[in-house]
């Protein structure tokens, strides 16, 4: 069975390429989806790519991902929660409750930015964190999920 990777993007990521390009770069969310699709194909996986500005929608998708992972259909989630990273206990609880494997992703190095961005409510609930590699961090996160998938097979 071919597994998929779910890439979830939170608030304002639909503005990639126009919002603060000095921090987030010139790539659009469509560009990021293409990078992710290529990375998944390279590792023999399929991609589900989603974005929402609404916290409840992201929670529903995490629940969906947990169920898909339990069925063996999903390798895990790459999650760029945007500003919700620094504010949402509900997303933390959804990750833990759904028992889904999540890699937290940040395009910028949040630790080199404003102090309020230094704390993540998600980090204690996720498998790992990738930050500061621009949009190429998505490819790194997908590669990490693929390595985990390979390790489970052995």
Image (spheres, rainbow, N blue to C red):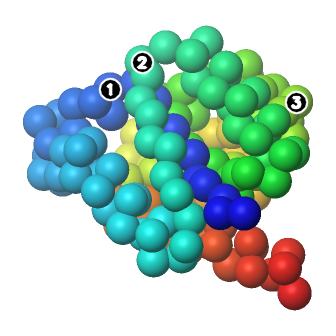
Coordinates of residue 143 in the picture (x, y in percent): 55, 73
Q: Kindly identify the residue that appears in the image at 45 percent across and 70 percent down.
A: 41
Q: CA distance from mark 2 to mark 3?
A: 21 Å
Q: CA distance from mark 1 to mark 3?
A: 25 Å
Q: Is residue 51 visible?
A: yes
Compared to residue 144, the image places residue 126 above or below, namely above
- For label 2, the residue is 53
Task: Name which quarter of the figure residue 3 lies in.
Answer: bottom right
Closer to the N terminus: mark 1 or mark 2? 1
Contact, CB < 8 Å: mark 1 with mark 3? no
Q: On the image, numbered disc 3 is attached to which residue?
A: 97
Q: Residue at x 87, y 45 (%)?
A: 70
Quarter occupied by the C terminus: bottom right
Q: From the viewer's perspective, is the residue at label 1 or at label 3 nearer? A: 3
State the image quarter where residue 66 is shown.
top right
Q: Residues within 10 Å of mark 1 (few under 14, many from 20)?
A: some
């Amino acid at each position: 069975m071919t597994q998929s990777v779910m890439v979830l993007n939170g608030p304002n990521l639909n503005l990639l390429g126009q919002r603060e390009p000095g921090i987030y770069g010139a790539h659009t969310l469509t560009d990021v989806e293409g990078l992710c699709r290529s990375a998944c194909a390279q590792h023999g996986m399929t991609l589900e790519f989603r974005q929402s500005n609404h916290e409840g929608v992201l929670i529903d998708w995490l629940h969906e991902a947990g169920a898909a992972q339990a069925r063996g259909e999903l390798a895990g989630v790459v999650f760029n929660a945007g500003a919700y990273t620094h504010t949402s206990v509900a997303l933390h609880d959804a990750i833990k409750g759904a028992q889904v494997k999540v890699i937290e992703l940040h395009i910028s190095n949040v630790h080199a930015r404003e102090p309020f961005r230094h704390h993540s409510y998600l980090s204690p609930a996720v498998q790992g964190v990738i930050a500061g590699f621009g949009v190429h961090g998505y490819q790194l996160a997908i590669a990490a999920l693929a390595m985990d998938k390979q390790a489970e097979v052995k």
